[in-house]
Image: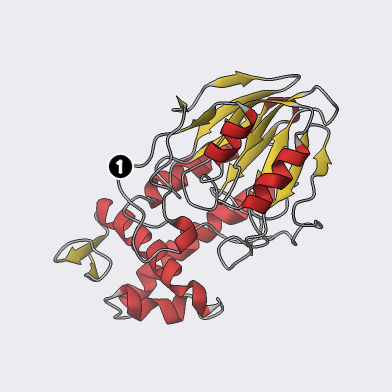
Amino acid sequence: MIPFVPPPTFEYGRPDAVSPLIRRVIADNPGPFTFTGTGTYIVGGAGPGAGVGVIDPGPLDERHLAALMAAVQGQTVSHILVTHTHRDHAPLARPFAEAVGAPVLAARLPARPTHASAAPDDDDDESFSPDVVLTGGERLAGDGWTIEALATPGHASNHMAFVLCEENALFSGDHIMGWSTTVVAPPDGDMTAYLASLDAVIARGFSTIWPTHGAPIVEPGPFLAAYRAHRLAREAQVLARLAAGDRRIADMIPALYAAVDSRLWPAASLSVWAHLIALERAGRVRATPEPAIDADWTLV
């Protein structure tokens, strides 16, 4: 079982100091895919005149913009970082950047769109355009803090996590979430890439993981081991459903996700599809006529 983390204690729009170098402001956009809402992180000192970086400004929401402006009043914003271009993370980046006079740094928009049946929050902000394109490995120096860009494709092909070097902490975006597993939605989402990125995060041995949605993961080792084991167990369950005679994803979902809120089943079907695509690449299953979401799937 994954040791999921209870929701944080917070008030919408209030900047909470959650570590010596991190403050968090949560947007009022709760939902089945955003949990309590989008958490925007402010990195750096909280005092007047401090230079700070801001991660995932969030959805296009005037109240959240006002809350962020109040949180950084009297400070200098040097970097605005975006983990990926889904609508609950990226749209406020440009208005906030124009208000504070800071550049936006992120990976490019993905070449392939998120699947049309994914949650609206997982649609891409197609108007998004970073001022500085990140590819992973860049180190950004701030006022008493250093951030490393860590490419973590899988949930989105352009997903970028950010390492706060001084606290050995990872801002994981949607790659790792403390309250839920992550949706991997083809054609942009890719399960093979997701698992490789997860292994890369595990290898780093972070002390704390700060997801964009939900509370921090303060014991990453056992949590990530369970997170990875869950994905491999789900893969085994998909193979078992095929062995039992299921041929379509729609036939598998009620059995695989019986304990999950049915509102999440459309997204769950995309993750199952991602597993099947990875298995098809590995030569373990076959899709007829092609590996589409409505294909017939059989064991090889």
Q: Nearer the viewer, residue 43 or 154?
A: 43
Q: Residue at x 55, y 77 (%)?
A: 261
Q: Quadrant of residue 78?
A: top right
Image coords of residue 100 (percent x, y):
64, 30
Amino acid type, callout 1: Ala
Q: Quadrant of residue 141?
A: top right
Q: Nearer the viewer, residue 114 or 244?
A: 114
Question: Seen from this angle, which residue lies furthest right?
Answer: 47
Image coords of residue 273 (percent x, y):
34, 63
Q: Give the residue number, with chain letter if any, for mark 1.
A: 111
| Secondary element at image label 1 | loop
Q: Residue at x 42, y 65 (%)?
A: 236
Looking at the image, is 27 positioned above or below residue 75? Answer: below
Q: Residue at x 58, y 33 (%)?
A: 97
Residue 149 horizontal side relative to residue 269, left or right:
right
Give the image's coloring scheme: secondary structure
